[in-house]
């Protein structure tokens, strides 16, 4: 069955000598359906079936399936949920890393055991076959598509989880196993049981593609845990939170991420939930450091009632670039100062609140109150573009708001007479944003020899204000 | 106090001008002199006469010092500013932290004085927690310089702060008013100042291994010169 020559632009005859010939596809036997697009490597599916979870209306059970899927992402990025009771992993490219089929089987079984759920594991080239095998209780290992039909032959039809009436009709014509169903003539099978069932059989044997929706773990970590009893004991609370933080740490390290914000909520019987929000200056994923910071905050928290449950809500995961360890200790010659700086900032923030720390940046504005901005400290020491500093000498201290001064004979007074010095500087700007200023700024000296920065409003009634102190 | 300082200014703070051969001999690093015992690293203060009077020739790099103006705003920050500018502009600069400043630090003036604003961190804290924050910052090893403004600081707290500053290899600066000069203090260096003309009179109340006495500093011409209106 060759393609017509006129259409084959890359026919071997037209290629120059020594050119690479396209691979010759194996000739397919007449009558077989078209094969799915070949992957570079045929897939190998591992189905993990949790027999304890057959009755799956319980949300707790589906949560266990979910956490198994999260853990399974350690082995391969291609994880699919097969509700209600199984998880599928595509593991062909992971075999070598985890010690072959046996090593992988041991590792996945270990993860299931850690969840308290014994599992049946089966390997097969098609996802449906692996799933049907485990659901029938057979932990087989089939690595090649050619052996699949033999392994499936003995499985009962119930393992396919088809609708009961279909299975009943098949049983009535004497078909009890998958193998018997596969031996039925294809055309007749499709006519009697529907094209959908025929497609399902094709997927079972790997003839048809079996796309599976990839499992995506939730992006933000949010988990709640009930305390064993209502308690206001700090030790019990800390232990519960610590196990939650360890889960958070695993969640983050699987993504090579850290969090910049973490909210802890404590639920009570009557009172509204209390809690605290931690903000970090750099992405953080380490459970021990998170616990230390959280405890610092919890010490300052007063509980209205005993705590019933606690909940952690993490902010968006932020990629945490791996850093090369330094040869020098911090503080030594050439040592990085960043690491202890981050720790200090987090400790101060945890105790004093997230708003307590700020760095200043310049804003190109002539109005003194608008010429700077306070912001949170930058995670790295990137300076960013800075506005050019003002050429005119300015006071080092600014009052939070201009302070009205009394006056005598048109001259300002503040705890005694003030002596004006130098020429005034006029600042008249800001008409565009509704905070217009029209002021004449003076320096003045008070009775203690301090230099002050005053201004006189230009519009009447020409009040005097104190606005700054030269330090 | 000031009259006393006036009398002692010239003899105590100007370095002895003796035989140059003797000078060369005395500059030998192996020679230990009781009068200038402090060989610790220092930050130049930016004022040559002050450097001559301070032990080691500048502000110490590690340890707690006190600056005691008569009242807030008499030039105490201006005195420290050249050192702060040179500290924060180094490429390997650590943080410079101000704990509980009494007013809003005015960023354009700091930038104009050469302070690298990204290295400057302001910590807002109430009085109860400001000493805690001061000690944490001093002892963390993450700061080159930590400044704090406080009224109440008993001597045992200051000793604790001084030890933290040495542990963190940090210059700690405590701004207090002049009344505090009456109390004893374990700080390395205590500097009183009062405004005088276009500058300030600095009195070294206590300096380990340095001179004592007073000297007059004049601010650089551009600092308080007549304002230029562009």
Image (cartoon, coloured by chain):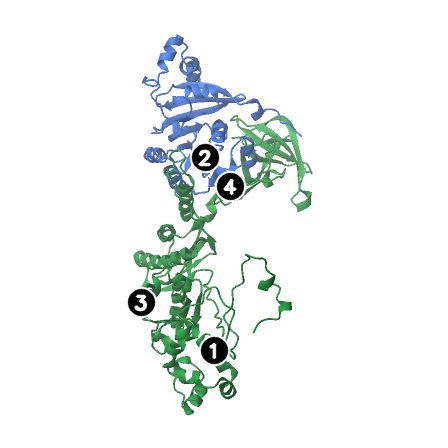
Chain colours: A green, B blue
Q: Secondary structure at mark 1?
A: helix
Chain to which mark 4 belongs: A
In the rendered structure, which disc, 4 or 3, sits on the residue that comes first in sequence?
3
Residue at the extreme top: B19
Real-space Cα separation, disc 2 to disc 4, in angstroms: 13 Å
Using the rendered image, report if marks 1 and 2 lie on a common chain.
no
Q: Residues within 10 Å of mark 2 (few under 14, many from 20)?
A: many
Name the residue rendered at 59%, 63% in the picture: A13
Chain to which mark 3 belongs: A
Name the residue rendered at 48%, 41% in the picture: A381
Residue denoted by label 3: A113
Real-space Cα separation, disc 1 to disc 3, in angstroms: 33 Å
Real-space Cα separation, disc 1 to disc 4, in angstroms: 59 Å
Quadrant housing the C terminus of chain B: top right
User: Which numbered mark, 1 or 2, is in the foreground of this view?
Assistant: 1
Q: Is residue A271 visible?
A: no
Q: Is residue B74 left or right of residue A350?
A: right
Q: Secondary structure at mark 2?
A: loop
Chain to which mark 2 belongs: B
Residue denoted by label 2: B93
Chain to which mark 1 belongs: A
Q: Are marks 2 and 3 in contact (CB under 8 Å)?
A: no
Residue denoted by label 1: A202
Residue denoted by label 4: A382
In the rendered structure, which disc, 1 or 4, sits on the residue that comes first in sequence?
1
User: Which numbered mark, 1 or 4, is in the foreground of this view?
Assistant: 1
Real-space Cα separation, disc 1 to disc 2, in angstroms: 68 Å
Q: Are marks 1 and 2 in contact (CB under 8 Å)?
A: no
User: Which numbered mark, 2 or 3, is in the foreground of this view?
Assistant: 3
Residue B113: image quadrant is top right
């Amino acid at each position: 069955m060759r393609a017509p020559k006129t259409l084959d632009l890359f026919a071997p005859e037209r290629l120059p000598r020594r050119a690479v010939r396209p691979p010759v596809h194996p000739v397919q036997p007449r009558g077989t359906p078209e094969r799915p697009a070949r992957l570079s490597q045929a897939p190998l599916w591992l189905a993990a079936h949790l027999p304890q979870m057959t009755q799956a209306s319980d949300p707790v059970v589906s949560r266990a399936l979910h956490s198994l899927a999260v853990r399974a992402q350690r082995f391969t990025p291609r994880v699919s949920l097969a509700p209600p009771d199984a998880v599928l992993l595509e593991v062909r490219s992971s075999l070598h890393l985890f010690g072959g089929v046996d090593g992988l089987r041991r590792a996945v079984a270990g993860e299931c055991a850690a969840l308290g759920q014994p599992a049946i594991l089966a390997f097969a080239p098609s996802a449906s076959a692996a799933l049907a095998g485990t659901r029938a209780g057979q932990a087989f290992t089939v690595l090649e598509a050619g052996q699949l039909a033999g392994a499936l032959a003995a499985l009962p039809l119930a393992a396919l989880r088809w609708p009961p009436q279909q299975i009943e009709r098949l049983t009535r014509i004497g078909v009890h196993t998958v193998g018997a169903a596969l031996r039925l003539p294809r055309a007749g099978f499709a006519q009697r049981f529907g094209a959908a069932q025929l497609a399902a059989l094709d997927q079972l044997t790997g003839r048809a593609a079996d796309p599976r929706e990839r499992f995506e773990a939730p992006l933000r970590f949010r988990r709640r845990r009930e305390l064993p009893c209502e308690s206001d004991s700090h030790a019990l609370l800390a232990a519960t939170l610590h196990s939650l933080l360890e889960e958070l740490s695993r969640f983050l390290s699987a993504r090579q991420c850290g969090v910049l914000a973490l909210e802890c909520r404590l639920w009570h019987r009557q009172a509204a939930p209390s809690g605290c929000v931690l903000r970090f200056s750099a992405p953080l994923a380490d459970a021990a450091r998170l616990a230390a910071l959280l405890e610092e905050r919890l010490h300052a928290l007063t509980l209205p009632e005993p705590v019933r449950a606690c909940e952690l809500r993490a902010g968006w995961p932020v990629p945490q670039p791996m850093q090369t360890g330094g040869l020098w200790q911090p503080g030594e010659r050439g040592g990085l100062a960043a690491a202890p700086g981050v720790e200090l900032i987090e400790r101060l923030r945890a105790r004093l609140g997230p708003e307590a720390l700020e760095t200043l940046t310049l804003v190109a504005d002539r109005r003194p109150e608008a010429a700077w901005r306070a912001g949170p400290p930058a995670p790295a020491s990137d300076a960013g573009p800075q506005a050019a500093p003002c050429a005119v000498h300015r006071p080092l201290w600014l009052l939070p708001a201009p302070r009205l001064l009394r006056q005598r004979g048109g001259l300002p007074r503040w705890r005694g007479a003030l002596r004006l010095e130098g020429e005034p500087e006029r600042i008249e700007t800001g008409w565009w944003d509704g905070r217009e200023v029209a002021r004449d700024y003076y320096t003045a000296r008070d009775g203690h020899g301090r230099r002050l920065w005053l201004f006189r409003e230009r519009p009447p009634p020409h009040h005097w204000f104190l606005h700054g102190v030269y330090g | 106090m000031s009259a006393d300082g006036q009398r002692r200014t010239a003899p105590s703070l100007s370095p002895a001008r003796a035989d140059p051969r003797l000078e060369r001999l005395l500059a030998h690093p192996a020679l230990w002199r009781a009068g200038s015992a402090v060989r610790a690293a220092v930050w130049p203060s930016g004022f040559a006469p002050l450097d001559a009077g301070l032990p080691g020739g500048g502000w110490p790099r590690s340890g707690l010092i006190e600056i005691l103006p008569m009242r807030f705003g008499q030039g105490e920050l201006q005195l420290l500013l050249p050192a702060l500018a040179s500290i924060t502009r180094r490429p390997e600069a650590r943080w410079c932290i101000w704990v509980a400043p009494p007013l809003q630090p005015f960023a354009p003036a700091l930038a104009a004085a050469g302070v690298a604003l990204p290295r400057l961190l302001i910590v807002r804290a109430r009085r109860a927690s400001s000493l805690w924050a001061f000690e944490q910052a001093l002892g963390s090893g993450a700061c080159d310089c930590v400044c704090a403004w406080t009224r109440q600081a008993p001597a045992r707290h200051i000793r604790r702060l001084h030890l933290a500053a040495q542990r963190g290899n940090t210059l700690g600066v405590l701004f207090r008013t002049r009344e505090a000069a009456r109390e004893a203090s374990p700080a390395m260096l205590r500097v009183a100042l009062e405004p005088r003309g276009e500058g300030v009179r600095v009195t070294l109340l206590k300096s380990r291994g340095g001179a004592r006495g007073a000297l007059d500093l004049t601010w650089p011409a551009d600092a308080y010169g007549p304002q230029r209106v562009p």
